[in-house]
Image (cartoon, rainbow, N blue to C red):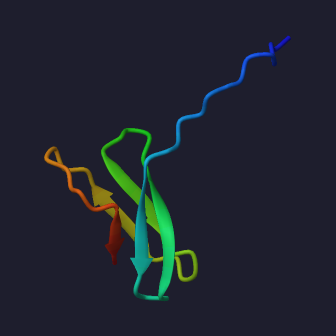
Amino acid sequence: MEDKSKPVKKTPRPSLGVRFRCCNVYWRIYMTADQKRFSGHCPKCGYPVQVEISPTGTDSAFFEV
C-alpha cells in the first residue's frame, strides 16, 4: 500500500514557448525523453517542430516557427 502521508514533489518538464505563425497560436513544446531536443506540433494544423539542444544553450525560452 502506498504511503500518502509524504507529499510527492514533481519537477516540471522542461519546455519552450513557441508561436506557430502558420495558425498564429502559442503553444509549448517539451523536452524529449533522451533530453536531446524539444519536440511538438502546432495544435491547430499539426505542423511538426523539433528544436535541438545546443551545448552552449540560449537565454531565450520563446521562439517563432
Q: Is residue 16 above or below residue 27?
A: above
Quadrant containing the C terminus is bottom left
* Residue 48 percent location from the top left of the image: 42, 70
* Residue 41 percent location from the top left of the image: 48, 69
Query: Going by the image, does 17 lie left or right of 4?
Result: left
Q: Is residue 22 above or below residue 13?
A: below
Q: How many marks?
A: 0
Identify the residue at image location x=16%, y=44%.
Answer: 55
Identify the residue at image location x=43%, y=47%.
Answer: 14
* Residue 47 percent location from the top left of the image: 45, 77
Q: Is residue 55 above or below residue 41?
A: above
Identify the residue at image location x=46%, y=60%.
Answer: 29
Query: Going by the image, does 47 lie left or right of 36?
Result: right
Identify the residue at image location x=52%, y=42%.
Answer: 12
Kindly indicate the quadrant of the structure image that contains residue 59: bottom left
Query: Going by the image, does 40 lie left or right of 61?
Result: right
Q: Residue furthest left?
A: 56
Quadrant containing the N terminus is top right
Q: Is residue 40 above or below residue 57?
A: below
* Residue 25 percent location from the top left of the image: 51, 82
Query: Going by the image, does 39 lie left or right of 27?
Result: left
Kindly indicate the quadrant of the structure image that contains residue 5: top right
